[in-house]
């Protein structure tokens, strides 16, 4: 049986709203929270992050098909004080 080769990068198959959440959810700080005006602060339903421990790194797929970080691997450079991980923060 001949093996079929699959393209490394595939077209977007997610719905636009789902894609937006996968790529952008809690990667930017909430500007309304900084002004003490965010009405979605409790129960933390805001699309953006309020506190550093809510912040996500934006997942980016590189040209070679890999991502800038793996959600399965804990960041060994994670700073408990600031909540930052420099790995994959591109």
Image (cartoon, rainbow, N blue to C red):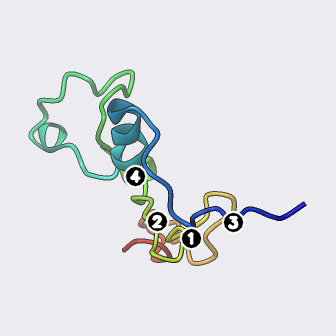
In the rendering, which numbered label is found on residue 61? 2
Residue 40, horizontal then vertical, whole percent: 26, 23
36 vs 4, nearest the viewer = 4
In the rendered image, which residue does mark 4 sit on?
55
In the rendered image, which residue does mark 1 sit on?
66
* Residue at screen point 56% across, 70% down: 66
Q: Which one is earlier in the sequence, the residue at label 4 or at label 1?
A: 4
Residue 29, horizontal then vertical, whole percent: 24, 50
In the rendered image, which residue does mark 3 sit on?
5
Q: SS at mark 1? A: loop
Gap between marks 4 and 1 measured at Cα? 22 Å
Q: Are marks 2 and 1 in contact (CB under 8 Å)?
A: yes
Q: The N terminus appears in which quarter of the rendering?
A: bottom right
Residue found at the far front of this picture: 1
Q: Nearer the viewer, mark 3 or mark 2?
A: 3
71 vs 67, nearest the viewer = 67
Gap between marks 2 and 1 measured at Cα? 6 Å
């Amino acid at each position: 049986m001949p093996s079929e080769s699959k393209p490394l990068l595939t077209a977007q198959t997610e719905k636009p709203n789902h894609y937006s959440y996968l790529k952008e959810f809690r990667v930017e700080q909430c500007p309304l929270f900084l002004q003490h005006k965010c009405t979605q602060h409790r129960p933390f339903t805001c699309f953006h992050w309020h506190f550093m421990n809510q912040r996500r790194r934006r997942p980016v797929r590189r040209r070679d098909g890999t991502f800038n970080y793996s959600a399965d691997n804990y960041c060994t450079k994670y700073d408990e004080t600031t909540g930052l991980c420099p790995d994959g923060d591109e």
